[in-house]
Each structure stands twice: as structure tokens, then as C-alpha cells.
Amino acid sequence: MKDFHWSVPANIVFGRGKADTVGSEVSKIGAKALVVTGRSSAKTGLLDRVLGQLDDEHIGYCVFDSVSANPLTTAVADGAALARSEGCGTVVALGGGSPIDCAKGIALMACSPGRVEDFLEKGFSEQEYSALPIIAVPTTCGTGSESNGTAILTDPATKDKRGIRDDCLIPRCAIVDPSLMETMPRSVLAPVTFDALCHSMESYVSPGASPVTEAISLECLRLLTDNIVAANDDIHDTEALDAVTAAASAVGMAFYVSSLAAPHGLEHPLSGLRNIVHGRGLAALTPTVIRHSVEGAPEKYAVISRFLGGKGSEDCAAQVEMLLDRIGLSVYLSDEGFTEEDIPWLASNAFRVSKARLLGNPKPITTEEEVSLIYRESM
């Protein structure tokens, strides 16, 4: 057995109605809160619900709601400046992966000199960094950001979409309430649940997988393949939605340790350039990437295929395509506005910002020519 290191001290509070414990969890920290959210939390009533809890606990707060679908480094800078000027000592993230990732960046930069772009470009040094404590309340069941220390941010100046990864960014508490997911329209639900499925598949086939991450990835894969269609058919199917939500959060711990693979590495240039929905980009790319990767881990792709109802590695990509069709997510890059003219930029950017995930694919992707071919076949 190869060596491995496991370090994900995630504190997940899971269950329907647990969103009513946000105030009590923040009170354990006892500091003024910066509430980071997008606009949807106000529309669904979650923002007012949480602010009411903070009032009941006599906790001061201010609200930062300038988070876009793919969070920007400029938003992190603005949020960190607000946190410092208001004397906030904790960050409460409400929403999908975008507000949670933005909140992580804000929590880091509220305690750190310099620019967040410096962390994205160079990573962390040997120096230990700190961040404000984070309470994460996800409203989508896909990213797993609430249960790990990764934040994905886009620099609008370069359109580079990169990640920051450090244990100081793991939320102090993740409050995962499946009832909050029921406000998602199907156009949101399908991409986020497929994102969770990709996390399970990629973390399982990743060369960085260990016996611990494989066990989590496989159980999440089982929960997702058993329930993703039912949840997308009826978001009020509580058994299916609860299972999908639990898997989406749990697999966030697995891929934080094992890493992800080429589908995510190749998607980031897409949403960096066009600001598309992350899960739709994954849907366009994943079957093609599997066809290019299957010979690197045929036994594992056979397992995935059988979870999806297939027979072996040779039909894994087709099984993924059938699933995408069943949840209404059969898309191509051309549907998202991409053309052949975009391929050179995408391929170059993929190797500049996502090289580790390309080389860390089950079958390493080592040339821009192969990347260009994958993008072309996904058009």
C-alpha cells in the first residue's frame, strides 16, 4: 500500500432544519460576522432567516452580496476591505460554491497582506497563513466547497481561473440542510448534481487516490448514481435529494486529498473565458475526456460504468452520456457559445493554469495538441 496523508478536519452539521442553527454556531465564535452571499439567498428568504438568528444571538453583522456566478478576485478584494473596515471576526457564507469560495478568499485576505492574485499565481509558501473562521451554509448540492480548504477564483484581468488550497480555509462549521436545496430550479440542479458526480468519478480515478479517499468516493458515487435522476425528476423527493446532498458534501473531503483530474482542469478555462455554468462545461467535456483516459485506469472506469448501469470500461463514456440525457444536460461546447477559434486560447490557458490536473489524469495529457483535440471533439 502506498503512503498517504489524510488531513480534512471538516465539521459538518447535516440534516433538515439545521439552517436554524447558524446563529448558535456563529455565537460560539463570538465575533461580528461578514455575511457573504449572492442575490438568490435574499430572494429565497435565507438571508433574512440567518440575519434574524444573528440578531437573536446579539451578534453584529454586515452583508456582502456582490458575488458572481464564477467568483472574481476583485470581489474578494472588496469583501476583505469591508471585513477589515467593519471589524468582522468571522465570515458566514450563504449560497452555492461561488459565495463559499469567495468567502474563503475574503477570510484569507482579511488576515493577509498583498493581493489574492499572488496566492493564486504562486501558491502558499512554507509560511503559515491564517484566515477568519468560516461558517458555510450551502444552498446547492454540488461543489463540496463547504467541506474542504479549496477556493476557485477567476482573475477578470487575465480570465485565469485558479485555485487556492490550504487547511486554514476549511470552514469551522458547514451547516448542510437539504431543505435549502429545494429552491433550486432544474436548470441549476442538473449542473450542480453532475458536478458532484464528476467529483466522485475524478477523485476515484485520480492517481492521488488512497484507500480512504477511494472508500468515500465510491460511496458517494453509489449515492449519486442511485439518486441523481430521481432528485432531478422531483426535487421534493426528500430521500433522493438528501442522499445527493450528503454525497456532494462528503466527496468534497475526498477530492481535497486525492485531487481532481482532466475534466475539471479543462473546464476551468471555459468558465474563465465565457463565465459559463461550471457543471454545463463539465457535461460537455466529461464523456470525451473519459474516452481519452480510460486506458489509464480501465479497472476503475469499469467500476464507474457498472454503477451507471453499464458493463465495463469500454462503455463508461456512453453511460455518462445516457445519464446526462436523462437529467436534461446533454450539451456541447458550441451550445455554450464556443467556436473553433477559441480552441488555441483554451488549450494554452489549460496548460498554464491546470497543468497539474492534466498531468495527474489517469492517462496523463501531455500536449496542447491532445487538449485541442478534446475541446474540438466536445464542440
Image (cartoon, grey):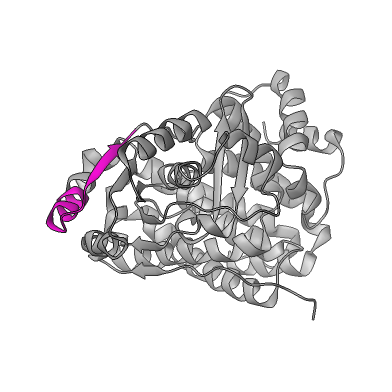
Q: In front: 252, or 205?
A: 252
Asked whether, in this view, residue 284 is left or right of residue 66, the answer is right
Asked whether, in this view, residue 233 is left or right of residue 252, the answer is left
- Against 24, residue 142 (above or below) is above
Q: In front: 337, or 347?
A: 347
- Against 226, residue 39 (above or below) is above
Give the image quarter of residue 238: bottom left
Q: Quadrant of the N terminus?
A: bottom right
Q: Position of residue 242 (x, y in %)?
A: 35, 66
| Residue 340 in view | yes
Q: Position of residue 249 (x, y in %)?
A: 46, 62
| Residue 332 in view | no
Asked whether, in this view, residue 189 is left or right of residue 374, the answer is left
Q: Position of residue 175 (x, y in %)?
A: 34, 62
Q: Look at 51% across and 51% down and name the residue there.
A: 194
Q: In this figure, what is the number of numbered marks?
A: 0
- Against 329, residue 130 (above or below) is below
Asked whether, in this view, residue 362 is left or right of residue 104, the answer is right
Q: Position of residue 220 (x, y in %)?
A: 52, 68
Q: Residue furthest top?
A: 341
Q: Quadrant of the C terminus?
A: top right
- Against 98, residue 304 (above or below) is below
Does 103 lie within the magenta span? no
Find the magenta span and give its range: 49-65
